[in-house]
Image (cartoon, grey):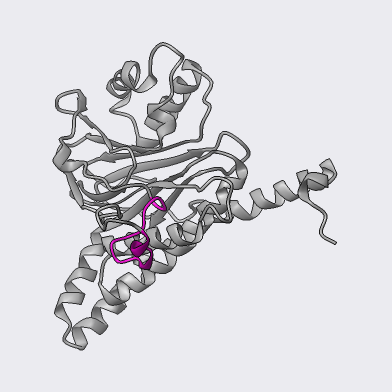
Amino acid sequence: TIKPIKEWPKDELVEELLHVQEVSSLVLPRDYPRLPGIDYHVSIDPSRGCVGGDHVILVNFRKYKLKQKIAEATKSGNTVLAGRLEKNLDSFGILIADVAGHMISDSVTVNYLHGAFKTGIIYELNHNGEITPELFEIVNSDLYTHMQPDYLQVKPYTTLLYGEIHGDGRFRFLSAGHPPPIIFSNEFNKIQMLGSDRTKASTPLGVLPGKFSIDTEHFGSPSITNGGFDVNEIHLLGHGDIMILYTDGLIEHNDGTSGFRDTRLENILRETKDKPAKEICETIKSELYSFYTPEDDLTLAIIKKVQGHKRH
């Protein structure tokens, strides 16, 4: 006979949650790639425990034996694949995801996403030489198919931003319903607004089936599917320019009358723009927490264009 969780003693529930937290934390970032010309820092602050609904994946392309793959592709005469693989030598990838909810148990969906994406990277590099939007269409269809209301009281969804930062400051990214990057110009000393042509986004993952999903037939019109993922590009051309990637814990943070992002963030960036990325990040968090007690997970990635190589 299986004892329902609601009948478990408190000490057993606590032990189980601690174990969930411990196992879920195994996917937190550990390998921080370095790239000349880029200084960056990543911070994840769950509202409960050490894990929650936010997640970051850093993609160190050099860990995937790129030079060996390039040599093999060149030897076989596949110059297109070799060329695509070579472009990854001057970049690293960063994925920021936000699962609906911020409980420790929401990290289960995070781990599901983590495994699917990391497995997909290997396939993508072997066959395409780069990470393509098709990988996210597959992940979306998989989340949509498996996380159905038949099995869950509330169907979760996930917003996601994945991008690749290059040494010259270019940032190519796609978004699944995720907030766009915030760009602070060192030259103009202010946050620069990004046009809609550089912030195209699809629906969050798991909400709609993909265009080629077998579940499309269940809908009356093929127009109500996830239409794919557009790739945007941003240029951080100036020395000292700062880009912030984040979850909605930053933009939704308010004290009941005003929002932190609209009233405080730009001044903080003006005051700290000459500091290393880590110090900028810590200052933003310190000011945010003093502004009002957060009610959601908070993830920040500060990416700064610099002249030389910096330690991350």
Q: Position of residue 184 (x, y in %)?
A: 23, 30
Residue 117 as seen in the image, left or right of residue 49: left
Q: Locate the C terminus by quadrant.
A: top left
Q: Position of residue 222 (x, y in %)?
A: 26, 58
Taking the magenta stretch, the answer to whether it contains residue 58 is no
> Total marks drawn?
0
Q: Position of residue 245 (x, y in %)?
A: 34, 39
Looking at the image, which is closer to me, 215 or 307?
Answer: 215
Looking at the image, which is closer to me, 225 or 286?
Answer: 225
Vertically, is 136 above or below 289? Answer: below
What's the magenta bit mostly, secondary-structure-wise? loop
x 14%, y 27%: residue: 187
Looking at the image, which is closer to me, 184 or 204?
Answer: 204
Residue 82 as seen in the image, left or right of residue 250: left
Residue that extends furthest to the top in the rendered view of this protein: 257
Range of residues picked out in magenta: 205-218
x 35%, y 17%: residue: 264
Residue that extends furthest to the front in the rendered view of this protein: 220
Taking the magenta stretch, the answer to whether it contains residue 209 is yes
Residue 131 appears in the figure? no
x 18%, y 49%: residue: 168
Q: Locate the N terminus by quadrant.
A: bottom right
Vertically, is 59 above or below 16? Answer: below
Vertically, is 259 above or below 94? Answer: above
Q: Position of residue 169 (x, y in %)?
A: 20, 46
Residue that extends furthest to the bottom in the rendered view of this protein: 76
